[in-house]
Each structure stands twice: as structure tokens, then as C-alpha cells.
Amino acid sequence: MLKFIARRLVLGLITLAILLVIITLIPNIAPGDPARKIAGGTATPERLAQVNESLGLRDPVSTQLTNLGQSVFTLDFGESFSVAAGQPVMDLVFTALGNSAKLVALSLIIMVPLAILGGLVAAYKKDTWIDRTIVNTGLAFSSIPDFVAGVFLLAFLAVPFEFFKVQANAPPGSSILVQIQHLLLPAIAVLMVYFGYIARITRAGTITSLDADYTRTAFMRGLTTREVFRKHVARNALQPTVAVLGTQLGYLFGGMVALEIVFQYPGLGNLIIRAVDRADYPVLRAGVLTVAIIYMLATLAADLLIAWMNPRARLNIGEDA
């Protein structure tokens, strides 16, 4: 198991190294002068030279790559140029990351149990009107882009009902309940987008488990349906769901840009888009690398959870090691 974890970490570091190279090359191959984009069209030559010096854009690419790698390990990406001029980049990233973590946590708390329950019920009621209702409802929701779902919720819930808030960002010092109240609509939008996908994955895994020999044997031994689901079906049926959730976690942290814009929420995706728009390369680099590291750790956690759920997977890991 330890060798499996070490191997996955090595693969993750290789991926991170490739991403470092790409991020280093972006300002060097992008059209135009990055320093002028940051400093503005009326910047003096002295100001342009200062920006180039701060970003290291006049250094060889190998030196830029080495400096960026050092920034990752020291968590020091310098100061922001335009998103929040003069502020440390990692302060901005950690603040946005904390905001995204709140939204992701609430979204998962709402979405995961409902989607898994929907998939289990659809599988148990296979080919009935209940199954078709759950599947078709999920398909209808998942075909709606997240920002459209957000606008829909604003129009039909936030406008007529005072309980739902237009802005997802609660006032400073708000209690947890008030923060949840502000985050409820974007969390529901995530539920609408992901419910059908997760429910279908769970349904397919459950049907496969119900048709397996070990399930039929369990029924023949006289176990009740609840015992069969709890002891034999659930763990095997949920393994594909866990894998999907692990791969989607990175998107939830960095890809909900449209929702964050619709609900005026200062999350990590919103910060990255602002950095792109204002050519703030230090913020852009730190934000993209943060999302990549989250994705790497989430997929590793999902693999380990699957290994814990499935003894055969643990055996295969031990043999591979």
C-alpha cells in the first residue's frame, strides 16, 4: 500500500512538473508584452523594466522554471500586480480557497447523499416509473449549464423569497447559519448539474452488484434486502461513484467560475479569471497550481477509499507493490 501511495505521488509530481513548464512558457509565448499588459499602455520604460524584473521575464526560461518551482515549495509567489496590487499572492489564494472550500463542502453535503440515494432507489426500482422519473429528471438537470441553473434559481427563488440571497458571500462576521443561507442557491445549482450524473453512475454500479453471484448467494442464505444492500451491494456499487467524485473535486474548486460570477462569490475560479483578465501572472500561476494540487490529492484520496471499500483492490495494490 505504501509503495502504491508513493507511486501515485510520484506520478502526481510528474504531472505537476509538466504543468510548471506550461505555466512558465505562457507569458513567454503569449502575444504582446506581458509587462505592458500588467502596467498599462501608458507605463513608462522604467515601470516596464520594474515589472519585467519582478516577473523575471528577461531571465532564461530555465531560470524562470527553477524560480517557479522554488515558489511552489516555499509558498511565496510574490505580490499581486493588478488583481489586488501590492498584496501577497498566497494571501489572495488562501482567502479564495477558503471561500471555495465552504461552497464545495455545502454542495457535497447536499448533493452526494441525494444523488446516491436517487441512484440506489432507481436501481432497486429498475424499469419502473420511479426509475424512469429519477433518470429523466437527472438528465434534464444535467443538460442545463451551471450558470443557467444559477440564473434560474435567482429568478424563481431569490426574487420572490427573501430567505434566499442573491449574493453568495455573506457579510463579514456572519454566523455559520447565515453563511449557509447565502451559499444555499449556488449549492442547489451544483446539485442540479451533478445529480443526474452521480445518480446514473450509482444506479449502474448498483445494478451490476445486484446481478452479481455474491448478491444472489446472500439472498439464498436468507438475508434481508436491507442486509444485502448494507453488507454486499453498497460498497461495490459506490466504488465508481467515489472515483467520479474524486475526479470532479478539482473542478468544483476551480471550475465553478460561472456560478461564482452569477452569485458574486470570491472563490478560487473567480480569482483565476480575474488574474487572466488583468494579466496578473503571479496570481494566475498560484491559482492554477493550487487547483492542480487539489485535483491530484483528491484522486489519490479516491483511490485509497476505493481500496478500503474493496478487499480485492487492496490485494491488487499489494501485489502491484
Image (spheres, rainbow, N blue to C red):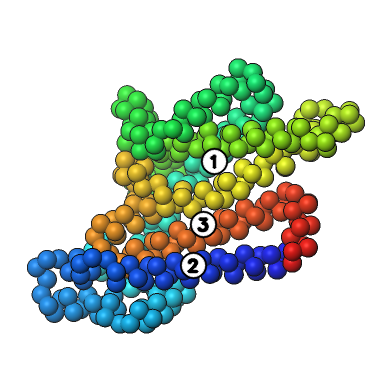
Query: What amino acid is at disc 2?
Result: Leu
C-alpha distance separating marks 2 and 3: 11 Å
Identified at 70% across, 68% down, the residue is 3
- Left or right: 288 with respect to 248? left
- Residue wearing tag 3: 295
Q: Which residue lies furthest to the top in this view?
A: 129
**Circle 3: element type:** helix
C-alpha distance separating marks 1 and 3: 19 Å
Query: What amino acid is at disc 1?
Result: Ile
- Residue wearing tag 2: 16
Q: On screen, 53 above or below 209?
A: below
- Residue wearing tag 1: 109
**Circle 1: element type:** helix
Give 133 or 165, whichever is nearer the viewer: 133
C-alpha distance separating marks 1 and 2: 29 Å
1 and 3 marks in contact (CB < 8 Å): no
Percent from the top left, x then y, of residue 4?
A: 69, 65
**Local crowd size for mark 3, using a 10 Å CA cut-off: few (<14), some (14–19), many (≥20):** many
Q: In which quarter of the image is the C terminus?
A: bottom right
Q: On screen, 87 above or below 308?
A: below
Residue 150 visible in the current orientation: no
Among numbered discs 1 and 3, the one appearing first in the sequence: 1
Identified at 44% across, 72% down, the residue is 72
Query: What amino acid is at disc 3?
Result: Tyr
